[in-house]
């Protein structure tokens, strides 16, 4: 099992990518908030999934993720970590 | 006096597409590519105060009274600011005769949106005053404002902000031609992939022996209904997948109307307008900061909403991965060399003369964030977009705070009023159906 630090790093990387997508900073603690509360919409989510596919080689659209995995950047990072 | 360079704001490729649409729309409707936003106000508002606010705003933003011109040396189109603003006034038409107020925009406002914007500036207002509810509508020219920018402009006026509104990046963009050419190739391939031996199924446009007005049918969803729709979207398509959910239901309802009318066609193509403001331009008001995605749906699948949703989500993902929106923006720059009239004809070539089966957009809810206009509380904000012809018909959604509104915009004669109401009722019903995924009944009659 990879160290918890890696999930934290993944979470930070996703935060950085999301900042580019939504056009504003993702504050500390925001990685625990649901994506829709951070202003992410359909297009924003799809853009984030595209970034994840390109960076990690994971097609999350086909990975059978549930809404629960998107409850926060942290959970999404965990889903990515579990599939790497 | 400002120098020539300060008076010129170069148009982007998307702006030039809009110029081409302006010509096409004017040829059919007698009126350019204009739309309207209608604000339902929970109370009175003083026309004199509004008039004063508007003209102060115009004085500070002469761009509203500009015109499209071309640089004679490099043919790049630009928006030229006026040298003088002496005679320019923003029109405010006070209409006490419009008094049939319900929760939805009164029919009298639809008449306003079909009037051409005569002279300058590029916005005009109508005020239907009431005691407990008033309506304030802004008619605007898409040459200068997209829907998101129009909402931002309204908020700016309504909040009496003194901030000068930025026009964003207005460089001439006569560089990086190879990258723009490659973008054009990608766009061309995308459009060719949408083609078939037949054009996409579409309702016939009315005969053009006279200017044709646009008609509108509205529905509004309260916060509880919005929650239901969001839940249904999540269960049917996925978390945050509202746009593909709305699009799938809209295609399904349009398909039923086409079947009832005997409109043949193997597939539907739907151009979807997207807000393409870059993070640095999020607060930019003027000009068009948008792009498009194109969705294709097979008619054989259009009776099954589950299939439509799956196709919509998949295509949305693929176009995001291929950066189609970005490439459309870039490919537009070299197209500026074409006269707008020629570009208008060229735009319809890939899809055999049309731009799609119907037009679609979901306007965000982030643009007008305030809950008042000139201190009067806002109940709701509606969009009344006029659709360039063809296709001449569009289904649009906009959000205002915790509300969602839908409008069907169509050219008079494309649908009977009863068919239009039925179509909108069908969309509303299906958006609110509980339980997530559904298999449609192919022969279900819209009622």
Image (tube, coloured by chain):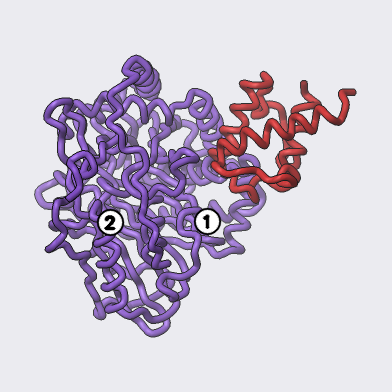
Chain colours: A red, B purple
Chain letter for the residue marked with disc 1 in the picture: B
- The residue at 34%/70% (across/down) is B136
Quadrant of the rendered image containing residue A48: top right
Q: Nearer the viewer, residue B398 or B338?
A: B338
User: Is tag 2's residue or tag 1's residue first in the polypeptide sequence?
Assistant: 2
Q: Please give the residue where the numbered disc 1 appears in the rendered image.
A: B429
Please report contact status of discs 2 and 1: CB closer than 8 Å, yes or no.
no
Both on one chain, marks 2 and 1? Answer: yes
Camera-near label (2 vs 1) is 2
Question: Which circle marks residue B313 in the picture?
Answer: none
**Element under disc 1:** helix
- The residue at 25%/26% (across/down) is B335
- The residue at 90%/23% (across/down) is A1
Q: Is residue B318 visible?
A: yes
Residue B401 locus on image (x, y percent): 53, 61
Q: Is residue B146 visible?
A: no
Which residue is farthest bottom? B131
Q: Please give the residue where the numbered disc 2 appears in the rendered image.
A: B61
């Amino acid at each position: 099992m990879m160290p918890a630090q890696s999930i934290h790093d993944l979470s930070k990387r996703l935060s950085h990518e999301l900042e580019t997508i939504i056009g504003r900073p993702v504050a500390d603690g925001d990685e625990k908030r649901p994506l829709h509360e951070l202003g992410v919409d359909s297009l924003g989510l799809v853009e984030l999934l595209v970034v994840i596919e390109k960076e990690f080689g994971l097609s999350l659209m086909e990975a059978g993720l549930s809404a629960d995995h998107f409850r926060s950047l942290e959970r999404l990072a965990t889903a990515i970590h579990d599939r790497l | 006096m400002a120098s020539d360079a300060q008076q010129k704001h170069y148009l982007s490729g998307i702006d030039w597409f809009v110029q081409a649409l302006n010509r096409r729309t004017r040829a059919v409707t007698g009126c350019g590519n204009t739309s309207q936003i209608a604000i339902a106000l929970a109370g009175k508002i003083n026309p004199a105060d509004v008039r004063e606010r508007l003209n102060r705003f115009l004085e500070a933003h002469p761009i509203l009274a500009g015109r499209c011109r071309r640089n004679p040396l490099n043919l790049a189109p630009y928006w030229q600011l006026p040298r003088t603003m002496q005679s320019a006034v923003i029109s405010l038409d006070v209409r006490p005769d419009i008094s049939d107020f319900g929760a939805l925009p009164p029919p009298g406002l639809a008449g306003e949106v079909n009037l051409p914007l005569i002279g300058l500036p590029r916005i005009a207002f109508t005020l239907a005053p009431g005691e407990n509810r008033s309506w304030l509508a802004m008619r605007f020219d898409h040459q200068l404002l997209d829907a998101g920018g129009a909402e931002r402009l309204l908020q700016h006026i309504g909040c009496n902000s003194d901030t000068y509104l930025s026009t964003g990046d207005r460089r001439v963009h006569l560089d990086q031609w190879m990258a723009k050419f490659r973008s054009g190739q990608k766009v061309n391939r995308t459009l060719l992939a949408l083609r078939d031996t037949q054009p996409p199924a579409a309702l016939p446009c009315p005969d053009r022996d006279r200017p044709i007005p646009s008609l509108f049918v509205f529905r509004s969803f309260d916060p509880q209904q919005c929650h239901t729709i969001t839940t249904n979207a999540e269960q049917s398509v996925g978390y945050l997948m509202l746009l593909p959910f709305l699009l799938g239901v809209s295609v399904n309802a349009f398909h039923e109307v086409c079947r009832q009318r005997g409109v043949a066609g193997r597939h539907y193509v739907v151009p979807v307008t997207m807000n393409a403001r870059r993070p640095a331009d999020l607060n930019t008001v003027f000009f068009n900061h948008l792009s498009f995605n194109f969705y294709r749906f097979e008619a054989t699948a259009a009776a099954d909403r589950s299939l439509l949703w799956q196709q919509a989500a998949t295509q949305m993902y693929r176009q995001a991965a291929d950066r189609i929106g970005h490439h459309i923006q870039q490919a537009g720059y070299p197209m500026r060399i074409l006269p707008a009239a020629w570009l208008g004809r060229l735009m319809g070539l890939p899809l055999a003369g049309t731009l799609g089966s119907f037009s679609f957009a979901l306007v965000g809810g982030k643009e007008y964030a305030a809950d008042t206009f000139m201190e009067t509380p806002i109940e709701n904000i509606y969009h009344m977009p006029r659709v360039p012809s063809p296709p001449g018909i569009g289904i649009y959604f906009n959000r205002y705070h915790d509300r969602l509104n839908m409008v069907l915009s169509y050219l008079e004669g494309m649908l009977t009023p009863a068919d239009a109401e039925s179509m909108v009722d069908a969309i509303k019903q299906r958006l609110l159906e509980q339980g997530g995924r559904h298999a449609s009944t192919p022969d279900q009659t819209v009622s």
